[in-house]
Amino acid sequence: MDPYLEAEQVWAFFRKRFIEAICRVISVQIPSHYPRLARRRYQAHEAIQEEYIELRKSAQEPPTTVIDIVSPTDKTTDSACKAFLEAREETIVHGINWVEIDLLLQRQPLLESLRSELPEWDFAVTVNRHAKHHQYEVYLSTIKKRLPRIKLPLTALDRDVCLDLPTIFTMAYDEGGFASLIDYAKDPPIPLSSETHQWLDATLKLAKLRS
């Protein structure tokens, strides 16, 4: 992942591109379902809407799976956090698979069990299957490693589908033109350890994004 994407003026654009890339991949990989964009609403200084993905077999049936991507405001704004947690709880209570993708370095994770029970990590994907109430499958990664490939649950009669997050990230990043939008000569918008700063500097120079 790229910590520069967490800049306030960049994140919303990247999140939209990432969601669009997930939808395109799902449309090809899962012909039995179609992705539909839904919206979660909350009030901050103004009315805010955040899109997430519902997988459905038909418009008349409830969602099989919900995929949501955590935003910085979900961690930093009380109303946004409340709306996100309520959406998660409602999804799980109604027997719908929940997939939560947290690609943010800043702040604590929204799932409390991730805060102390697991090895060192930067990014996490948590999956709750409809048949396993509040039992989470957890996929972890660090800033120095590729994002994980995850098993996407559907109905009890369907096999899991592999969702390749590294490929999806690359699609969103390249199609959004973020390499030219971001000034990699500057420090990232979030604090990093000195060791991570050194690693990032070397990585950017190797990619010719920094001189």
Image (cartoon, rainbow, N blue to C red):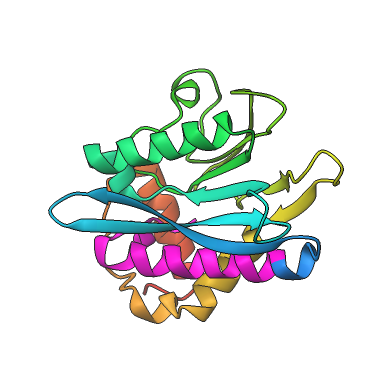
Is residue 144 at all visible to an observer of this figure? no
14 drawn magenta: yes
**Residue that protrudes farthest toward the front in the picture:** 60
Instruction: Measuring from the top left, give residue 132's x and y in whole percent.
Output: 69, 24
Quarter in which the C terminus is drawn: bottom left
Q: Quadrant of residue 57?
A: bottom right
How many numbered badges does the structure rendering display? 0
Characterize the magenta stretch by its predominant secondary structure. helix
Front residue of 39/129: it is: 39
Q: Residue at x 68, y 32 (%)?
A: 130
Left of 127 or right of it: where is 30?
right
Left of 204 or right of it: where is 155?
right
Q: Vertically, is 129 above or below 165?
A: above
Magenta residues (range): 1-26
Instruction: Measuring from the top left, give residue 131's x and y in whole percent.
Output: 72, 28
Instruction: Measuring from the top left, give residue 192's x and y in whole percent.
Output: 32, 45
Is residue 123 at all visible to an observer of this figure? yes
Left of 77 or right of it: where is 5?
right
